[in-house]
Image (cartoon, helix red, strand yellow):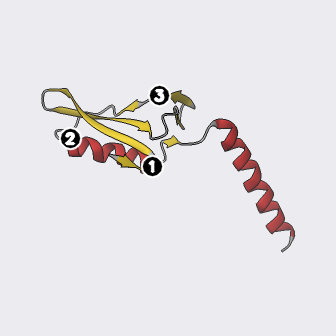
C-alpha cells in the first residue's frame, strides 16, 4: 500500500509473526530522524499477529514522523528559512 509518499508492505517474518517494510515511493533512501541514518528500507521491529496490525504499526511510525522524505541538506535549508521567517515576523511587531 502507498501512504504519505511511502510504500508499506506487510510480510510474515515467522509463522504467525508479521512485520512491515517501509520504503519511499520514489525509490530514494529514507532518513531515520533519531539516528540520522539513510536506509533503503525500514522494517518494523515488533512482531504483529496479523498483516493488518503490521501495516498499522508502520503507518503509526510514519505519522510519528520517524522518517523524512527530504535529505539532510534540504532539512537544514528549511530550518534556516523558518528562522528567517520568524525573525521577519518578530521584527515587524
Q: How far apart are labels 2 and 3 at the CA level?
A: 21 Å
User: What SS does tag 2 mark?
Assistant: helix
User: What SS does tag 3 mark?
Assistant: loop
- Which residue is the site of mark 2? 51
Q: Residue at x 26, y 41 (%)?
A: 54
Q: Residue at x 77, y 61 (%)?
A: 85
Marks 1 and 3 in Cβ contact (< 8 Å): no
As drawn, the label of residue 23 is none
Classed neighbour count for the residue bearing mark 2: other residues with Cα under 10 Å, few (<14), some (14–19), many (≥20): some
As drawn, the label of residue 64 is 1
Whole-percent x, y for residue 12 in the image: 20, 30
Classed neighbour count for the residue bearing mark 1: other residues with Cα under 10 Å, few (<14), some (14–19), many (≥20): few
Q: Earlier in the sequence, mark 2 or mark 3?
A: 3
User: What SS does tag 1 mark?
Assistant: loop
Q: Does residue 14 lie above or below 88 as drawn?
A: above
Classed neighbour count for the residue bearing mark 3: other residues with Cα under 10 Å, few (<14), some (14–19), many (≥20): few
- Which residue is the site of mark 3? 40
Q: How far apart are labels 1 and 3 at the CA level?
A: 19 Å
Amino acid at each position: 500500500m502507498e501512504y504519505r509518499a511511502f510504500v508499506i508492505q506487510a510480510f510474515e517474518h515467522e509463522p504467525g509473526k508479521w512485520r512491515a517494510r517501509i520504503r519511499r515511493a520514489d525509490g530514494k533512501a529514507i532518513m531515520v530522524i533519531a539516528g540520522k541514518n539513510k536506509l533503503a528500507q525500514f522494517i518494523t521491529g515488533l512482531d504483529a499477529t496479523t498483516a493488518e496490525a503490521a501495516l498499522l504499526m508502520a503507518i503509526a511510525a510514519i505519522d510519528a514522523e520517524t522518517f523524512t522524505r527530504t535529505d539532510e541538506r534540504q532539512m537544514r535549508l528549511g530550518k534556516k528559512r523558518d528562522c528567517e521567517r520568524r525573525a521577519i515576523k518578530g521584527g515587524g511587531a
